[in-house]
Image (tube, helix red, strand yellow):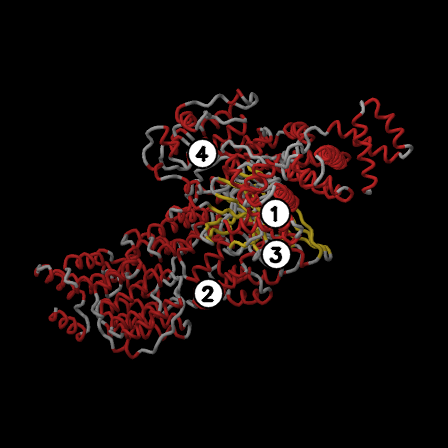
Amino acid sequence: MNRPASEEITQLLLAWGGGDETALERLMPLVHTELKRLAKRYMNRQRSGHTLQTTALVNEAYLRLIDSSRVQWQNRAHFFAISAQLMRRILVDAARAKHNLKRGGGAQVIALDEAPDVFNEQAAELIALDEALKALASFSPRLSQVVELRYFGGLSEEEIAEVLKTSTRTIRRDWKLARTWLYRELSRETNDDA
Amino acid sequence: MTPERWDQVGKLYHDALELEPERRAAFLDEACAGDTSLRREVESLLAAETRVGDFIAEPVFEAAAELLTEETTSGLAGRQLGEYEILAFLGKGGMGEVYLARDPSLERKIALKLLLPDFTGDEARVSRFIREAKAVSALNHPNIITIHEIGETDGRRYIATEFIEGQTLRRQLSARQLQIADTVEIVFQIAQALDAAHSAGIIHRDIKPENVMVRPDGLVKVLDFGLAKLTENDATQSEFDTQATSAASFKTGPGIVLGTVAYMSPEQLRGHEADARSDLFSLGVLFYELIAGRRPFTGETSSHVVVAILEQDPPPLTQFAPEISVELQRIIGKLLNKDAGQRYQSVKDLMADLEPFRQRMFRNPVAFNQQPTAEAPAQSTGKGAATSTKTTFARLFHQLQFHRRFVWVALAVMVLATAGFLYFSRRAETLTEKDTLLLADFVNLTGEDVFDSTLKQALAVQLEQTPFLSFLAEDRIRETLRYMKREPDERVTKELAREICERQGVKAFIVGSIARFDRHYSITLETINGQTGETIARSLAEAEGKDRVLRALSNAATQLRERMGESLASIRQFDAPLEQATTSSLEAFKAWAHGIELVRSRKSGALPFYYRAKELDPNFARVYVSLSLAHANQGEIEQAAEYAAQAYELRHHVTEREKFDIAANYHTMVTGDLLKAIEQLELWRQTYARDYSPLSRLSMLYRLVGRLEKSLAAAREARQINSGAYVPRVAMGTALVQMNRFDEAQSVIREALDQRLATATSRRDLFQVAFIRGDTATMQRQLDWAAQSSDSHLAVYWQAQTASFAGRLKQANELYQRAASVLAAESPERAALVAEESLLRNAMCGMCQPVKTAKPVAVSRITQQSQMPIAVSRALALALCGEFNRAQALVEEIAKTNPQSFLANAIWLPVIRAAIELRRGNPAQAIQVLQPTLAYEQTASFWPTFLRGQSLLAQNAGTEAASEFQKIQDNRGWDVTSPLWPLAQLGLARAAALSGDAAQSRQWRQSFSDLWKDADGDLLARFDAADELN
């Protein structure tokens, strides 16, 4: 990505931080593209033995997209919040596409090389998690957001506290409860299926 | 849940967690104060907390990477590629990415493989791959993936194939160990695919579990034929020296090196060309792996694997599969022999060895019982991965587990079915794929005439779909009846059928009967052992009402095929329902069948019946083929083309065999692309190895494209299959004459005459051979015969040809005219051809007046005419006579009308253009234009050779010119009566003069004068004058 784009992204981020909600809408597609591009590169590296961390991914996206000298720590946290939100959306969409294909296609699909089978379960789990998160958000938007930032965004508890303007302790408690609740919801669903 | 309630729950949860577990109950008792639902909620969360483990503890990085990568590479999803809509990303392989796509034109799902640019750089290799892939796909083999299209768009090559719902064998291997019975079945089906491909001359080169898919119903599909060729580096062509170069000589994309090398044969690794036996080695590796659960040749690196393949013996199979039989070990050992000469030499041999084994598996009821118990544990733990590997029986069992109360009923049915199968297979064991059957006449007990010949024809259509069965040709039946001193068209009853079987050594016959009770019809089909009279198989079908009879017959026929032991896979592939394949109208079918009967017994008048059939059912595809052929036989090229095109429109509603027929006919009659027609016929011949029809047509087409040896071979094979047919006899005679093998031609034609299998063409050939030899008595006998025949013009026509050959043009003109006027009433097209030939022969001799004043001709389709088409003849005559503009105008029109015609583009247009250039004084240009015709000289009536000779003369290249004219002298059979042959002697005389050999020149001049001793005076004067000038 070239500098003018970086300029634009920084501006948008600042605007959003300043309360301009429309800036977010314009910001998202730009981040989206970059995240995907980076993910692909990471995957290729991972094939040759490197492991991938979402935080590393988001960090790199941030460094590439943002003129960090002009953005404060808070904006950085905001950027991570957007990334987490986007990551969730992208992943769930991808998982859903995969899942629909399986259902629509009936049996197994053709593949030239082998993709691990766990991958299909992961897709299904992601979709279920997304549904549960939506349910959670209906009565506790904050908990849902904590999960999003932590699981999809790879943010630390401190960073989440920064984004949500609350204490790290609260975030730690929220995370624990949210995880437990989600785990119970998801395992209940599985049991019902069986 | 409300946010307030949730805050309550959250608080209690956290507070409780602070406490020791044993004190939590008391705490909640107090805190919830009788709010049981609140308490239940908190308690269930506390319970969940103990099990939560590392659930979503770590960020989603791995799934993210996987999914994002997929998403990135599948960026094409939702996009359009060519005409296809890409639906989803399916997978990625060494060759490229595979997508699921939709083909909107046919509303079907397809798999779309986008090839990586690395593999498509070498054009020659790509086109070879495309050719092979298409040929294999067109085999329409049930075990070979169907390729819909290979194309290129946005600079990317893609292959559109059928979308197979199933798993690769690799995935099945990783999911579980396969039963030996399943393994044999899978290997056998792969072998079937290889057998079909090998007979088409195509080697897979990359048999491995990744390239084999197994559908949930057990059908095996082999993928990627010939694709391996794309990945080989040129280095593989050089001799293998070290392991390092060998490993390096294969593309080293991620994940493909090891997999590919592990299945390669020693000779492939050494860089030698892979043949069928190489595929057998790879199949052996796969076979071994399926049984042992590991590969026979392993190593830490691909170099080690290479060494193992080249030098080491695989560990004994008993080490991994103690129960394996000695025979199977022997079979696999033979496949894995390092010396190709010691392996199976063809897939057929392997199949023959597997076949009894395979049947033993199926016949052994113990095997059925073992399946479900072996499957059961996999079912309870597996996540559906195991379902597709089960055999039919095992799958059935699996389904039955969900319906326990039906188990015993179903078991009883299965036992009965098995008993029935064993019964029939025991009886039928003498009936193999190589046997021929006889179709007896239907026993019609209804008293309704409409069923008389109709049902036998309908049954023939239905049964002839299968490559598994072949039937004694009608001609052979008639021939046998003649030997039996019976009428050739006598009804073949059950008794008569048995007698014919005995005489002809036919193993079995099929007889059907239809009976009626009120509106209720019942049809019985029976296969009967021709030697013992025992019933081999029987099937029954019922129909309510006359219009359902064809459908019932179709069902009964399918059932009969199954009971005669044809595999279900084969039946699935080759079983278009009768109404779809032919027509639902019994009346239409009857009319068509009647027409066919007339043709088969070489009677005329079939056309009106075809028209009637077409009227009754305009979608009856077969009728259009028959109409097309009938019109073509009358020289009505346009009508023939029209019907061929209509049949082509309906080609999706026909049997597999008819598809070949229709496509070949389309290319022969409509586009004139004879090479494509030949391709279709070759595929037909490979799919239905004992079919007579493709061979008989190939014999003709190969001759037209100048492949005389192939023409002869096809004709011979056709004769072998149907010794009572006349087409192969005639084709053999004509091909032999054209090859200058006059003695053989004569004896073939005489034999045909003796067996009453000769036609007017045979007589013409005999006449021409006699003409070459100066055997006037034989010539006269043929002329006498022709004069008496229904084609009485032939006698005059043949004489016209010999007269013009000898330079007696005036006489020839008169004879041509007489022949044309005799023909005019019967067939204006053929009359016009005769008249045109006269004009051209005048032009050859420099008599241009008639050409210049002749009425203009219409340009029509040039398809499969064995005579020079009218427009071509005229254009050539005009060119020879210096009428360049008119000739050029015709050339353009011919080219426009015949963009795909082989004869027009490969032969005639270059010839005319060369004639124009030569007469315009551009001999070098003429020689260049003639270049493409070089390959077809033997079928072009001396024209390319003669014009090249003349052009060389014009360039004063005496020696080169002489060699062209000499070629004409040496190949009289190319066109026995053409005046170009004597004129070539004149050419030789001039060439010799150019080279300064006056004696030789005089000798040729004398020879020419002898040939033309009775030639028209003015003509001789003309040539003498021309010689003076030279």
| Residue type indicated by callout 3 | Glu
Q: CA distance from mark 4 to mark 3?
A: 51 Å
Discs 1 and 4 lie in a common subunit = yes
Q: Which residue is mark 4?
A: B257
Q: Residues within 10 Å of mark 1 (few under 14, many from 20)?
A: many
Of discs 4 and 3, which sits in the foreground? 4
Query: Of marks 3 and 2, which one's residue comes earlier in the chain?
Result: 3
Characterize the local packing of mark 4: few (<14), some (14-19) or many (20 or more) Cα atoms within 10 angstroms: some
Residue wearing tag 2? B641
Residue B565 showing in the rendered view: no
Q: Quadrant of the C terminus of chain B?
A: bottom left
Label 1 residue SS: helix
Secondary-structure class at tag 4: helix
Give the residue at mark 3. Answer: B579
Chain to which the residue tagged by mark 1 belongs: B
- Residue drawn at x 58%, y 33% as measured from the top left: B172
Mark whose residue sits in front, 1 or 4: 4
Marks 3 & 2, CB-CB < 8 Å contact: no
